[in-house]
Structure formats: structure tokens, C-alpha cells
Image (cartoon, coloured by chain):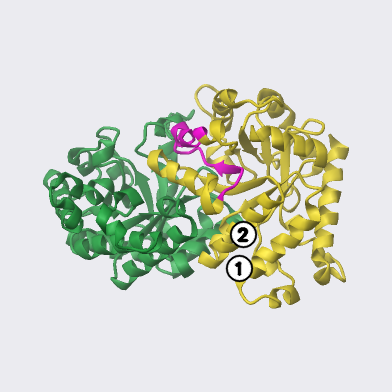
Chain colours: A green, B yellow
Amino acid sequence: MIIDKLYESVKEKGHVCLGLDTDLSYLPEDFFKGYENIEDALFNFNKKIIDETLDVVACYKVQIAYYEAYGLKGLAAYKRTLEYLKDKKAIAIADIKRGDIAKTAEMYAKAHFEGDFESDFITLNPYMGFDSVEPYLPYVKNKEKGVFVLLRTSNEGSKDIQYISTCENQRVYDFVGEKLKDMGNDFLGESGYSSIGAVVGCTTGFEGKEMRNKLSSTFFLIPGYGAQGGTAEEVASYLTLGNGGIVNSSRGILLAYKKEEDGETHFERYARKAAILMRDDILKHI
Amino acid sequence: MIIDKLYESVKEKGHVCLGLDTDLSYLPEDFFKGYENIEDALFNFNKKIIDETLDVVACYKVQIAYYEAYGLKGLAAYKRTLEYLKDKKAIAIADIKRGDIAKTAEMYAKAHFEGDFESDFITLNPYMGFDSVEPYLPYVKNKEKGVFVLLRTSNEGSKDIQYISTCENQRVYDFVGEKLKDMGNDFLGESGYSSIGAVVGCTTGFEGKEMRNKLSSTFFLIPGYGAQGGTAEEVASYLTLGNGGIVNSSRGILLAYKKEEDGETHFERYARKAAILMRDDILKHI
């Protein structure tokens, strides 16, 4: 099970998931100028960051929107980034938040679990219902793939639908969590966690312990740390020592160099430094 | 407002939205063999279908999953299909069902309202909340673009989350509908409809009239007709004579040729025939 590989990686390297949400404006000016086209610039920035952080982060999350925005050239950089991660035996999460049914979902599975854009995990949106998750399950079962389904996100608007109270006095996100846990029971790894994980933001206080206990076999992908306001204390409440989830940071790591005088020329070193700081900050609070 | 252009198109050509969910297996064998690569085959199949149906369908919906599944080559065909629709002054809906926030949503807007993948409308998923719709609004206001937000879908699993009853005795999809209507009031066209539309499946009986009345300024994108089981009678309950929404059909039109003896050589003519039949079937029931 792919979840066991992620579990081992977290145990070894800490809880950081490095978000390669690479916008062109994040690239140091001189670095950008050194490349003839967008594709090469984006990919080589990612490559430098990956090379410098492989031993200090558990995995990488690639947000497809940032590449899609640059059309076919951007998506070529996205493809090369995923291929490079695979070469380096790093775990790649494709943050694509797809949510569609039947044949369409099968096509998305084909797109992101095979071929040009192959990754280890993808993120999914459950609004259309649990039959929108099912088409991915054969890949989870037979192809060492996994999914993280949106449960409770880290933005203010998460309250609009995810926090709606049902008549059974349960919130929508609690209901989604229960269903995912049930569904995940068929895909448990040796680690005790399931390859059906959940996205759980950490910006809403300290409900972490309760959720961690309730969804004991669900591995969490946790956004919201740093730039979005989540603290290491909050984050830690969703984790167990050395495991239980990964914590995403993108800008906090990719743009760490901006605060440094020689940052432009050594951006990857400052990314490494920021990743280590974050890793240790979280570990300190668990 | 782009919604007025769609409104006029429906008035003139009927309610059919032709879904270009083009899987390679949908192409007649000999046609496929005539092309050297997937990109050319997919695009030229679409081109033939478009040429033959421009005067009998209101608009086209391109489901990105079908192209993504073939990686960069598939997405190159997706790009060319959108460009061709633009050349022909046809209205294009990109069925991408994105749902993400802040900077990520801005990147998706850039990806699908500008550049390589520019379309007129995109579909959105509201699970992350209404702040996941906001980043698209500047394009709706200033760039003649529109969105269709998932409200109630046509699949069985739609009941899982969309049908949850809130304590205020309202269903999640009703709540989403109300919010969308409010949001849409700032983007009303001369037609009385808003460029913030909603996806409403027609496979759940005859609630259409009620929804059409309640969401009087919301234009509907209606999936579920034909292959998914929705009848013209059900569909018609969501429409007003000559307007109020568009009804999607993909396989029912693209694969109409499979039932005909000479279908393989004249697939586009049978697509046209099927589109006309569908258009008239719906009109008869309104």
C-alpha cells in the first residue's frame, strides 16, 4: 500500500509536505532569465528545490492550477516535475481536487494514475457523492495509488457547506469523515492507516485531537500552516508523534529566500532551511 | 454579458448543449486510422461534429477529463477544439468542475478564461465554499465570462451530500441554490438571467418546475438526459419555452452513428440527426 510508503517517509523525515505551487513570479529574476521558455524555467526551479529537500520532507504536493495557468507549456513542466519526483523515488501528491462520476472519473484516474501526469496520490472533492470516489479504488487496490478526499478545508468559506449541521446533529464534514473511514477500511496498510486519506485544514482551532481519535485510521493531508495562519501547536493536535499526517507548506518554503540578502542566488538553500525549521517546529509541539 | 449570448443562442437554436466528451474509442476505426497521432484524430473528429451541428445546438461543452487522460497530446486536442469553437463563434463551456480558493482559483481562472484553454463558461464545485467562486467574478464582470456551479447533480451519489437536510429544514442543494441566486444578482444580463448559472441534473423526477420558479434568474446547465435516464418530459420541467437552460448530451449524439449501417463513414451526419431529434423532443414537451 502506498500509504505505508508515506508512513515510513514521515517517520524518517518528519511531517512536511512541500507544496510545489510554483508561480513564475516566485522565481528569482536572474534564474528565470537563464531559461529560454516557461517550461524549462518552472521545471528547473522545481528540480533545484527538490534536490535540496529530498532528505528533509516526507513528500511533495504539486498543485496543477499553477501549471495549467501557463497552458500546454506549464503542463509540460508539471509532467517533467512528476517524472523527476518519480526518478528520485519521492512521493508525489497531485493536488487536482477532481470530483466527477462514472466514465469521467475513470478518465481522470487514467490521466493522473497513468501516463504523462502519473502521481502517487491525488486529491478529490466529495460534493458529487461517494460514487465519485469509487472509480479510483481499483488503482488504490491494484496499482499502489492513494487519494486524499476534501473533508474540512482551511479557508474561511469552508464554513458555508462543510459546517452545515444535519438533523442528526452532525456536521457535513463529520459525515464525510465517517464515510471515508468506512470506505478506507478496505484499503488499510500495515501501518494501520488507509490509502483513502482526508484533507483536513488546521486553521479552525484545536479540534485536532478529537478528529485524530475519531478517524484513527485516516491519514491527514493538512493545509493551512504558516501563510494561512495555522500554528505548529494547532497542526500538532492533528498528528501523532512521527505520524498520522503530513502538513503542507508552499510559499513559506519556496519564497523563504526573499527575506535574505543573498536569497536570489541561493534560493534552494533557504527553502531547505525553511523546511527544516518547519519540520522541527511541528515535532516540538507533538 | 455572456449569458445573453447563450440566451439568444438557445432562443434561435433550441436547448441542446453538445458534450464533446470525446473518447478515442468513440472514433470510427477507419477515421482514427487516417491520422498519425491522437491529437489530430481527436481534434478532427470534434471538428467534423462541430461543422455539422453549429446551426442546431445552442453551445458545446468540452469535458476536460477525456483529453487529460491522453496527457499533453490530449490537451493539445482540447486546446485546438476550444480555438476552433471560438473561430466559429460558438459558445464553449469547459466542464472542469474546479473548486479551490484564493491564489489557486486565480490560477484556474487564468488557465481557463485566458490563454491556451480559453472558454466562455467553466463549471465549478462549491464544496470549499463561496469564496472558491469569488476569484472568477472579475472575469464575469469585465471579460464576458460565466460560470455554472454544481448544485444538484444527476448521479445516484448526489444524494450523499447534496440532499443532506439542514436543521433549517432545507437541503444542501437548496441552500447552494439560494446563495448562487444572490451572488448572481450582481451579474444579471438583459435577458434577466445571470452569468452565474447552476448545474442541475434532471434525473430525480419532476422537481423542475419548483426549481425553475425559485431560481428564476439562474440559468441551468442540465445533465442527465438520455444515456443517464432523464426523459424529455423531466428535462422540460426545468425550462421555459425557448429558454431557461441548456440540456447536455454527449454519447447520445457522438455515438448515434453506431446504430446505422453506414454510420462509420457518415458519423457526423448521424450526430446532426440525433441533435435535431433531441432538440425537437425537448421543445415538444415544454
**Horizontal side of residue B64 vs B127, given as left or right:** right
CB contact under 8 Å: marks 2 and 1: yes
- Name the residue beneath numbered marker 2: B80
Number of dots carrying numbers: 2
Q: In the rendering, at what x and y percent does residue A141 appear?
A: 44, 66
Q: In the rendering, at what x and y percent does residue A79 appear?
A: 42, 65
Write the residue at 43% across / 69% down.
Answer: A143
- Name the residue beneath numbered marker 1: B39
Front residue of A36/B282: it is A36
Q: Which chain carries label 2?
A: B
Identify the secondary structure beneath mark 1: helix
Residue numbers of the magenta segment: B118-138
Write the residue at 35% across / 65% down.
Answer: A2
**Horizontal side of residue B178 vs A193, given as left or right:** right
Q: Residue A84 carries which label?
A: none
Image quadrant occupied by the N terminus of chain B: top right
Q: Mark 1 lies on which chain?
A: B
* Residue A14 visible to the viewer: no
**Relative vertical location of residue B139 with respect to residue A97 in this rendering, above or below:** above
State how far apart marks 2 and 1 are (Cα). 9 Å
Write the residue at 29% across / 53% down.
Answer: A27
Other-residue count near label 1 (Cα within 10 Å), few / some / many at <14 / 14–19 / ≥20: many
Instruction: Kindly identify the amino acid type of the residue bearing the numbered disc 1.
Output: Glu
**Horizontal side of residue B137 vs A8, given as left or right:** right
Write the residue at 55% across / 56% down.
Answer: A105
* Residue B52 visible to the viewer: yes
**Relative vertical location of residue A67 with respect to residue A54 in this rendering, above or below:** above
* Picture quadrant where residue A37 is located: bottom left
Q: In the rendering, at what x and y percent does residue B224 appear?
A: 70, 46
Other-residue count near label 2 (Cα within 10 Å), few / some / many at <14 / 14–19 / ≥20: many
- Whichever of labels 2 and 1 marks the residue nearer the N terminus, that label is 1
